[in-house]
Image: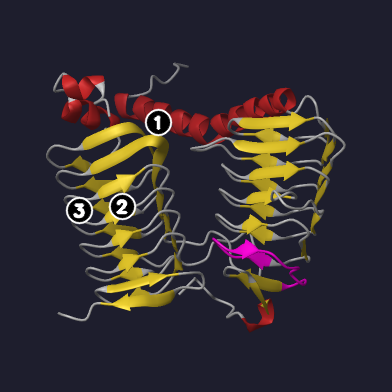
Amino acid sequence: MKPAIPSREEALQLARASLQMVRTEVFPRAERMVAVARARWMFRAFRMGRDVAAYGPVSARNDGHAELGDKLTFLGGMLPTSVVCYEHARLLVGNETQFNYGASVEAWESVQIGARCMFASFVRVSDRDGQRIAPIIIEDDVWVAHGAILLPGVRIGARSVVSAGSIVSQDVPPDSLAMGNPARSMSLDLVARDATGT
Amino acid sequence: MRAPLMMMLGLGPAVARLKLRRCGSVGATPTVWGRVWIHGEGEIVIGDRVVFDARMAPIELHAQQGGRIVIQDDVTIEGGSSIEAQSCVTLGARSHLGMWCKLMDNMYHPVRGNRHERPRSVPLMVEEGVTVGSRSILLPGAHLQKGASVASGTVISRRIPPGVTVGGSPARVLRREVAR
C-alpha cells in the first residue's frame, strides 16, 4: 500500500488550517500564561489569589495591607493600570474582578472592591481627595464605566452601574444606575431592557 | 517648541505612513507625532492632511471585526483619545478631537441582564466642522451634526443639532448659533 502524497491544494489547506488552529488555540493560552507570570512578578508585594493575569503593564505598589482575590484580570492598553496601597492602608479586591487599561485604584485608608466587578478604562478610585480620607466600598457585580471617578466615602451597592464620565460623590444604592456630575442614581428597573445608549 | 527630527529632515509624511501602515487607506500628507496604536481586524480609512498629535499620550484606533473607522480630510486628533468601532465610526472633515476623548459605538456590556453578552452597536457619526473638547465621551448613537461643538468632559449619546454647543454632565445646550 502506497502512502498518499497530498496534492498541492491539500497541503496548502492543511497548512492554513494548522495556522488557524495555532492562532485560535495556542496564542491565547500562551498570552494567558505570560499574563499570569507577569502578574506574579508585578504583584509580588501583594497577598494574591490564584490565576491573577496582567495582560499589560501594571504599576503596583503595596506598603500597607493589600489582598487580591482569584482570577483577576488587568488588561493592557495605552496607559498602565495602577494599583497603589499606601502605608497602614487596606485594599481588598474580590474574585474575578476585571480592570481595563488606565484604571487607577489608590488606597490611603481602606478600599474594598467586591467580586465580579468590572472597571473600564481610566476609572479612578481613590479614598483621598486632598481634603479628607474616607473608605470606599464597592460591592459585588458593580460595573464602573469609562472615565468615572469615585470620590472618598462612597459606597456602591451590588449590581449597580456607574455610567461613563460620571463623578460619584454620594452613595449609590444596589441595582441602580448612577450618572452625571455629581452622580444621580436611578433604579435599573427603569432602564429599557435593550438599551444601547441611545 | 522643537520640531521632531524626522520632520526637520522632511520625512514627516513618510514616517507617518509607516506608523499608519495598519490602516486600509491613508490620504495625502498625514502627520503623526508620537505613537498611534492601531489594532483589530476592521477597516480604517484616513483622509488627506490628517493630524495625529500623540506626543502626550498614545492614540488608539480600534476597528474590530466588521467595524469601520472613517476619518475624513483635515481632522485633528489629540493624544490619549481612543476610537473603538464595532460597526461604524465616522469623523467628518475639519473636525477636531481633544485629548482623552473616547468614541465608542458599542457599550460592550448590557446595562441590564447578562453582562457577558454584547449589546447591539449603533453607528457613531461626527459631521464636518465639529469640535470635541478634551475628556468627553461619545457613546453609541451620538450624532454630532455640522458645526456642533462639545465642551470638555461631556458625555453624549444622542443627536446634537448643527451649530449647537453642549456641555456639562448631564449634557445641556450651552449656546445656539443665532445667525445661520
Magenta part of the chain: A161-175
Give SS at disc 3: loop
Which of pointers 1 and 3 indicates the residue nearer the eye?
3
The chain to which mark 1 is attached is A
Q: Is residue B64 visible?
A: no
Give SS at disc 1: helix
Quadrant for the C terminus of chain B, please: bottom left
Disc number for residue B69: 2
The chain to which mark 2 is attached is B
Pointer 2 with pointer 3, Cβ within 8 A = no
Give SS at disc 2: strand
Pointer 1 with pointer 3, Cβ within 8 A = no
- Marks 1 & 3 on one chain: no
Kindly identify which residue carries mark 3: B72
Image: A73 above or below A2: below
- Amino acid on which the number 1 mark rests in the picture: Arg
Give how far across and how far down residue B167 sits, in percent.
42, 69
Label 3: how many residues lie within 10 Å, few (<14), some (14-19) or many (20+)?
many
Task: Report how far apart the C-alphas of labels 2 and 3 lie in the structure.
Answer: 10 Å
Pointer 2 with pointer 1, Cβ within 8 A = no
The chain to which mark 3 is attached is B
Give how far across and how far down residue B149 sits, in percent.
31, 66
Total number of numbered labels?
3
Kindly identify which residue carries mark 1: A16
Q: Is residue A164 magenta?
A: yes
Which of pointers 2 and 1 indicates the residue nearer the eye?
2
Label 1: how many residues lie within 10 Å, few (<14), some (14-19) or many (20+)?
few
Q: Name the colouring of the figure.
A: secondary structure
- Amino acid on which the number 2 mark rests in the picture: Ile
